[in-house]
Image (spheres, grey):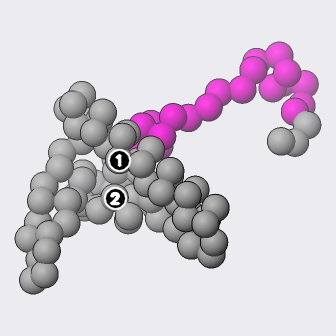
């Protein structure tokens, strides 16, 4: 962490939740639907596996996004649709 300025000292720091980040990303892209991996990429959480720890971090990041998506679906803020592909299927969110 970096030092904070006087204003932040007085006001405090606010943190965005993963849910609010996902919701904002989807609202910023109306008319489009994204897979979980595309959402992760759109949030700047590139999954680059170089070793065991980057694998664990990447998996944890995807898990937090999945959890956020499920909560947003329950709240009626996000919709999900399974799209069948030539091989397999993907879930898209908007």
- Would residue 35 be visible to someone looking at this image? yes
Question: How far apart in space, not on screen, are marks 1 and 2 (Cα)?
Answer: 7 Å
In terms of depth relative to the viewer, which is nearer, 30 or 72? Answer: 72
Residue at the spot x=55%, y=64% of the render? 55
Tell whether 45 sits left or right of 36: right
- How packed mark 1 is, by other alpha carbons closer than 10 Å (few <14, some 14-19, many 20 or more), is some
Coordinates of residue 60 in the picture (x, y in percent): 50, 50
CA neighbours of label 2 inside 10 A, class few (<14), some (14 to 19), many (20+): some
Residue 92 locus on image (x, y percent): 21, 59
Residue 84 is tagged as none
Q: Which element type, helix, strand or loop, lies under badge 2? A: helix
Residue ID at (75%, 20%) = 12
Which residue appears at 89% of the width and 31% of the height?
Answer: 5
Q: Is residue 76 left or right of residue 54?
A: left
**Above or below for 94 versus 82:** above
User: Does the rendering let one see residue 46?
Assistant: no
Q: Quadrant of residue 34?
A: bottom left
Q: Is residue 14 within the magenta segment?
A: yes
In this view, which residue lies farthest toward the bottom? 86
SS state under label 1: helix
Number of numbered callouts drawn = 2
Instruction: Choose between 78 and 28: the one closer to the eye.
Output: 78
Whole-percent x, y for residue 71 in the image: 30, 33
Residue 48 is inside the magenta segment: no
- Identify the disc placed on residue 66: 1
Q: Residue at x 83, y 16 (%)?
A: 10
Q: Which residues are magenta?
A: 4-22
Q: Quadrant of the N terminus?
A: top right
Q: Are marks 1 and 2 in contact (CB under 8 Å)?
A: yes
Mark sitting earlier along the chain (1/2):
2
Q: Which residue is mark 2?
A: 36
């Amino acid at each position: 962490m970096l030092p904070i300025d006087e204003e932040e000292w007085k006001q405090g720091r606010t943190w965005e939740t993963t849910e609010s980040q996902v919701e904002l990303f989807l609202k910023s892209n109306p008319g489009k639907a994204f897979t979980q991996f595309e959402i992760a990429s759109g949030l700047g959480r590139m999954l680059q596996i170089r070793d065991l720890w980057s694998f664990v971090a990447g998996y944890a990041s995807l898990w937090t996004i999945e959890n956020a998506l499920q909560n947003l679906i329950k709240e009626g803020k996000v919709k999900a649709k399974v799209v069948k592909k030539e091989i397999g299927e993907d879930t898209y969110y908007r």
